[in-house]
Amino acid sequence: MTPTRVSSDKKHKRSALREDRPGTQLQIYVLAATNELSAGIDLASGALTRLSLAGSGDGKSVFLNSKIGPLDTVVATVAGEELQEVDDPSEPDSIAVEALELRRVHLRRRRLRRFLDALIPNPEQPLLGFHGPATSYGDRDGTQPSLTLINTNGEIAVVRRSAYEPLIARFPWGPRLHELVIEDPLSQGVIPEDRYGRLSGRALEKALGFKPSYLVISLTKPRKGHCYKVISAILPRP
């Protein structure tokens, strides 16, 4: 197994080659932990990485039912080749791991900001390589990432149009205004499920407990043949 090249901004000074040899320990700074997604930055390469649990095959998050969440640092052990799943063209940035350990690591804010800002894509290009909120699973060929990170600089509104409807994030990126479903579990309570409304600016900052800055945007597993763009995490600037 050879190191995996992961799409990365050219201004990042570190290698975009993420080590994936079986038994290698990856130090991951966690950015997103949802029911379906476990993702973070590989601190050795600077690559945005999706983690899957070796041999599970159920699409569940590696971090599900654990105390691991965004802004934690974990050590993940790369699974053996026999446990690596067949390459999924919808998730070229994924790697299977078989062990996780929460690691208390102090990372300087300046270093974290360099990592984060280096991952931000060209705003003139479509998010995750295509326009619109979804793409056919059959159209995924492994040439585009399934994860990305953007900085909204606080320009985000959270909306629930009616009770029990999904929470939506509305934000500008490049020439377009985007609306994507929020699957970040830590953000669900800003507008209770049985209510509706819109929050932005100081009201949203108060509800979240921080000023929103970064968004982790990911593709879902196939749902009736399509993969959907969703907000997997709303994060502050370190």
Image (spheres, rainbow, N blue to C red):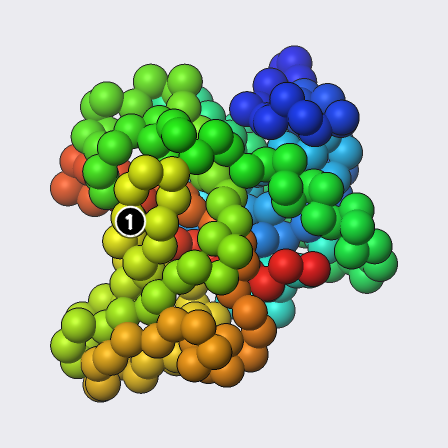
Residue 24: which quarter of the image?
Answer: top right
Total numbered badges shown on the rendered structure: 1
Residue 35: which quarter of the image?
Answer: bottom left
Q: Residues within 10 Å of mark 1 (few under 14, many from 20)?
A: some
Residue 25: which quarter of the image?
Answer: top right
Query: Is any atom of residue 134 visible in this view?
Result: yes
Q: Residue at x 64, y 22 (%)?
A: 10
Return the residue nearer the eye: 71 or 113: 113
Return the residue nearer the eye: 151 or 108: 151
**What is the x, y in percent for residue 227?**
26, 39
Using the image, determine if residue 153 lies above or below residue 187: above
Q: Quadrant of the N terminus?
A: top right
Q: Quadrant of the C terminus?
A: bottom right
Using the image, determine if residue 2 lies above or below residue 32: above
**What is the x, y in percent for residue 133?**
23, 42
Q: Is residue 173 left or right of residue 209?
A: left
Q: Residue at x 47, y 78 (%)?
A: 202
Element on which disc 1 rests: strand
Amino acid type of the residue tagged 1 in the rendering: His
Q: Residue at x 42, y 46 (%)?
A: 217
Q: Residue at x 39, y 79 (%)?
A: 190
Q: Furthest-front residue in view?
A: 175
**What is the x, y in percent for residue 203?**
43, 81
Which residue is identified by label 1?
Answer: 178
Return the residue nearer the eye: 93 or 161: 161
Q: Is residue 19 left or right of residue 85?
A: right
Query: Is any atom of residue 60 visible in this view?
Result: no
Q: Is residue 141 left or right of residue 8?
A: left
**What is the x, y in percent for residue 147?**
46, 38
